[in-house]
Amino acid sequence: MSTQLRILLIAVSFLTILFVLKKIRRTQLYIDDAIYWIVCSLLLFVISLFPQIAIFAAKILEIESTANLVFLVMIFMVLVKLFNVCIDLSVQRSRLNRLVQKLALMNESERVGRHSADPTDEEEARTKARKTRTGKKS
């Protein structure tokens, strides 16, 4: 692994941790998500400090370049996170759909309850409609 790549990984890891901590302080990121990103950053930091780990893993997996292994691991981690985000999104959509349905049922029962509570209003509306159609004035 080249020295430039190692320096880049250290810088990116450090900046990612700072960014995540900033978002936590501003309550813009949940702790569960922050832990994921901090662990990923620490993993990259360790690999950049001890490239022998990446070199050994690349040899075992028969990957020609250690840099390719690092990028492969990073892509895999992002795909795992994307899959988890998709699952969370599906759960939220389902919850939102149920909430909208409950709200619609509550609004409908309120509307029906209002009309059934005062039958004279409904009868008056029918009488006005008949008079309007026949041209009579009240």
Image: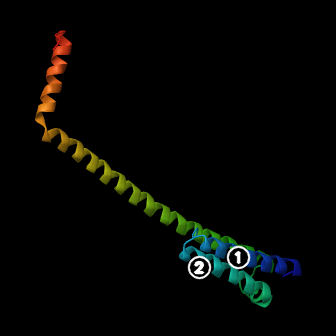
For the N terminus, which image quadrant? Answer: bottom right
Comparing 20 with 11, the one in front is: 20
Residue type at tag 1:
Leu
The residue shown at (31%, 48%) is 104
Q: Position of residue 138 (x, y in %)?
A: 15, 14
Q: Which residue is mark 2?
A: 35
Residue 64: in sight, yes or no? no
The residue shown at (88%, 81%) is 3
- Please tell me in which quadrant of the rendered image residue 15 appears: bottom right
Q: What is the number of callouts on the image?
A: 2
Q: Residue furthest top?
A: 135
Secondary structure beneath label 1: helix
Q: Position of residue 2 (x, y in %)?
A: 87, 80
Q: Which residue is mark 1?
A: 18
Q: Residue furthest right?
A: 3
Few, some or many residues within 10 Å of mark 2 (<14, 14–19, 20+): few
Tag 1 or tag 2, which sits nearer the N-term? 1
Taking the image as shown, residue 97 lies to the left or right of residue 63, namely left
Few, some or many residues within 10 Å of mark 1 (<14, 14–19, 20+): few
Comparing 66 with 31, the one in front is: 31
Taking the image as shown, residue 90 lies to the left or right of residue 60, namely left
Residue type at tag 2:
Ile
Query: Which is more foreground, mark 2 or mark 1?
Result: 1
